[in-house]
Amino acid sequence: MPELRRTPLYEEHKQLGARLVDFAGWEMPVQYAGIKAEHEAVRTHAGLFDVSHMGEVVFRGPDSEAAVQRLVTRDVARLAEGQAGYAAVCYEDGGTVDDVLVYRRPEDFLIVVNASNREKDVAHFRENTADLDVEVADESDDWALLALQGPEAVGLLGNFTDTDLAGIKYYRFVEGKVDGATAILSRTGYTGEDGFELYLRPDDAPRVWKRLIEAGASPVGLGARDTLRLEAGMCLYGNELDAETTPLEAGISFAVHLTKEPQFIGQGALLREDAEGLKKKLVGFEMEGRGIARHGHTVTRGAEIVGAVTSGTQSPTLGRAIGLALVEPEVEDRFMVLIREKPVPAKTVPLPFYKREKR
Amino acid sequence: MSVPGDLQYTKSHEWVRTDGDTATIGITEHAQDELGDVVFVELPEEGATFDAGDSFGTVESVKAVSDLYAPVGGEVVEVNTALEESPEKINEDPYGDGWILKLRTSGQGDLLSADEYQKVLDEES
């Protein structure tokens, strides 16, 4: 087995007694105190995540905007400087290469990619922009990434920065200092809560991490990150999204600008799919019978297979078994999930499963 | 991790408390710790019969699904139905309120003493 990569916070995780697992080739904390307690901490207080395994790719040069426009489904010409946008990256056939966050900075674009897709994405980015005057730089190793999330996150972070956090709207970012360290402070996240993601230099990250923990943030692992994002109805690449699934099918059409000019790779395929109708669609569901649906379980109606579960868990906030499934478009209210060969009834529910109260 | 001396164990981390021909079965403190927060248990009906080594149910945590294996053969005489509402008892009290089921034993399993089970744990860590 190849050696696992470690983030700059590896020693902090060990000290906190984290259980470490192999995640996309990285030795990452899956839990500290326990998934339910960590999940609860984010929903009610503030949780701190190490997501330094995520990849950061910078597009520089005169054609950087043209390159990003070609690669992502969102119209990035509409992003202001200091604004970030969620987008998909597609193949020509509309299948999904990755789902990413695009940051428009004054001089360049920063695209944040999933750890599991980093090498594939960078190759895809370079292959498809070779004719343009753009440098595609994989700067993933130059960044640590912390996510501070929860109703108390913004107040807690305010103790460590002079930046006016209240002035940073959702999906906006600024460069500033956190505990004296140079940082990008981005009001984004993957939990359904308010909070910030902090891009830091690797050398500064352990100190900032320790300070935020000492100030009361609970360390949260990838286990609760998954239950939090699922309650918030957010996609995970490899579950809801993959090369065989388009962003329209996965329900993220809000990140796809179908009439965009210049066109993005896959736009023709997505336009056709939009006109002809989706072959499958993503639905949220709750189990009505006893059992927890899991990724890969078959969805049936009568004797017919009509789809598959993409994600499923016991929701810590709702206390019910919830899930997402890609199903045939005509599937409406009810279906069965085969759990260990046994059909268990489920009903569709609107997404997201959980929405925070805006203050 | 606690390994009570008056119980017998399996390599798959179940424990057995034998009282005459009745065997009470659960999972060990180590097993519940490895699983994390238990959120669901699937148990057999009373009257079902199992041979030693058969899978008789599952325990699920938030992240993981784990099969349960019968440490000894026999007929199910009682299941801990309280776990359906409160599966967290398996985490809180794995050797007490978190017991899973009782079998009337009909055969011998290949069971480990507490010392032998402790060695299994030592080798795994």
Image: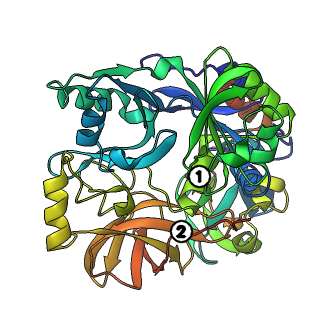
* Residue A232 location (% of width, % of height): 56, 61
Q: Chain of mark 1?
A: A
Tell me what residue is drawn at x 49 percent, y 18 percent. A141
Q: Mark 1 and mark 2: span between their CA atoms?
A: 18 Å
Task: Please name whichever residue, A334 or A213, is drawn nearer the observer in this view of the structure.
Answer: A213
Q: Check disc 2 and give the amino acid type.
A: Pro
Residue A15, placed above or below residue B89: above
| Spot occupied by residue B36 in the image (x, y as percentages of width and height) | 69, 48
Which image quarter is the N terminus of chain B in? top right
What's the mark number on residue A352?
Answer: 2
Quarter of the view holding residue A343:
bottom left
Q: Which residue, given by chain and number where applicable, does mark 1 sit on?
A: A170
User: Could you tell me which chain the residue with mark 2 belongs to?
Assistant: A
The quadrant of the picture occupied by the C terminus of chain B is top right
Few, some or many residues within 10 Å of mark 1 (<14, 14–19, 20+): some
Disc 1 marks which amino acid?
A: Tyr
Q: Residue furthest top?
A: A203
- On the picture, is A110 further left or further right than A304? right
Residue in the image at 52% along x and 39% along y: A82
